[in-house]
Amino acid sequence: GRRRRSAWGRMGFLARGCALRALARPTAGAVGLAVRAMSSETLLKTALHDKHVELGGKMVPFAGYSMPVQYPDGIKESHLWTRESAGLFDVSHMGQVRLYGNDRVKFLETLVVADVAGFAETHGGLSVITNEKGGIIDDTIITNLGDTLGMVINGACKHKDMAHMKEQLSNAKSKGMDVDLELLENVQLLALQGPKAMDVLSRYVKDIDFVKMPFMTAQKGTLAGAECLVTRCGYTGEDGFEISMPSPKTVEIFELLTADTDVRPVGLGARDSLRMEAGLCLYGNDIDDTTTPVEAALTWTIGKRRREEGGFLGADVILKQLAEGVSRRRFGFVVEAGAPPRGHEPLFSEGGEQVGEVTSGGYSPSLGKSIGMGYASKPHNKAGSSLLVEVRRKRNKVLACKTPFVPSKYYKVPE
């Protein structure tokens, strides 16, 4: 079960990153989430499980699946390769959802803070699903697919997300709304990330013009003879794509891409250190159902129209916070000396008062130093503030800073 934590960080479910500190100590902070023990018989497997094992992947339980935390080249090397070339990640544990019906936009806007109606066809963005108290049930990528809406939700959250959405769906249908939703089966999801991702994918997908494809858009394309949905997005801060494909074609597509000399398979450990350098939240560490998007520094996900109209669960709490501010806020920090925090360590002011808690932390391969994120009260969460973090009964100095730690390289279409 979960250990009890302070009010600074009652963090719950596993999510996009990996949750495996005890199994892979060198990885970044999210790898410090507790994994409930499961026998290998109870773990689900993606279509690539046997391929991961064949390639020497270190398989661990994650979000109910057996997933590779690292490959023989190690987490640091995989991390740096993704920053320099292209890494291929199996993220098939995540949930792919479709919403149908004439009222699908109206319905989804009761669940999320995004201006879904404002997404042009093929366009989308990051949003959060909120509860009645303004807390975050999950973060999600939403895309306008024309006659449907697409969502990608976290693997460890997908069943609770679906239960929540189906409850709200039942209420909507009882009011006469024309809407339905489903969690897609028999599909898998791969993420190709890094500065060479576009060049690589262009060699194998000939029916998409990637030069003209904006960030956070999706198009159908043919890969290894299969129709796939390719979305320009990712979880590393690099340019990249998430590719949804039919399960039977996954091994063939994985082998095709990894045969390219610019591509290497990458595990969840490096995925976590990459996302942390990019300043991206890990559900269950940096955000959960007790943190609001305002506290989590995710105000930018709240559409302008939604700030005026509300209409989503918890809007009264969130809109009040937008107007009046919050007492704590997520921020980034660099560890000036000492062991890196991994998550849930207390943060103190220089005067010795506890003012916050670490939510993610670990070593940054790109920077060659330890970094982290957490929550602290004002003014201690302001960039430039000095704090102390307690690691192994020793208090080390950290310096608050802006995120991302490594400049993001999201794609912009040439003018």
Image: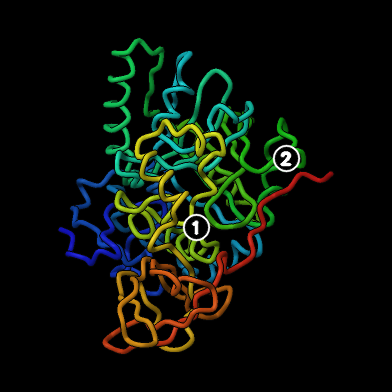
Q: Residue furthest top?
A: 176
Residue 354 image offset from top left, x and y in percent:
30, 78
Position of the C terminus, as image quadrant, is top right
Residue, disc 1: 280
What residue is shown at x 72% (from left), y 42% (from top)?
A: 202
Residue in the foreground of this view, choosing between 407 and 85: 407
Category of crowding for the residue at label 1, using alpha-carbon neighbours closer than 10 angstroms: few (below 14), some (14–19), many (at least 20): some
Mark pair 1, 2: CA separation: 24 Å
Q: How many marks?
A: 2
Answer left or right for 301 relative to 293: right
- Say whether disc 1 or disc 2 marks the residue closer to the N-terminus: 2
What residue is shown at x 32% (from left), y 37% (from top)?
A: 161
Amino acid under disc 2 = Phe
Residue 381 image offset from top left, x and y in percent:
46, 71
Task: Determine the secondary structure under disc 2.
Answer: helix
Hey, which quadrant is residue 212 in on the image?
A: top right
Q: Which label sits in the foreground, 1 or 2?
A: 1
Residue in the foreground of this view, choosing between 227 and 327: 327
When the figure is inspected, residue 153 is found, relative to residue 266, above or below; the finding is above
Residue, disc 2: 210
Amino acid under disc 1 = Leu
Answer left or right for 129 relative to 384: left
Q: How is the image coloured?
A: rainbow
Residue 197 image offset from top left, x and y in percent:
66, 51
What residue is shown at x 34% (from left), y 80% (from top)?
A: 348
Report if the CB atoms under discs 1 and 2 are less than 8 Å apart.
no
Position of the N terminus, as image quadrant, is bottom left
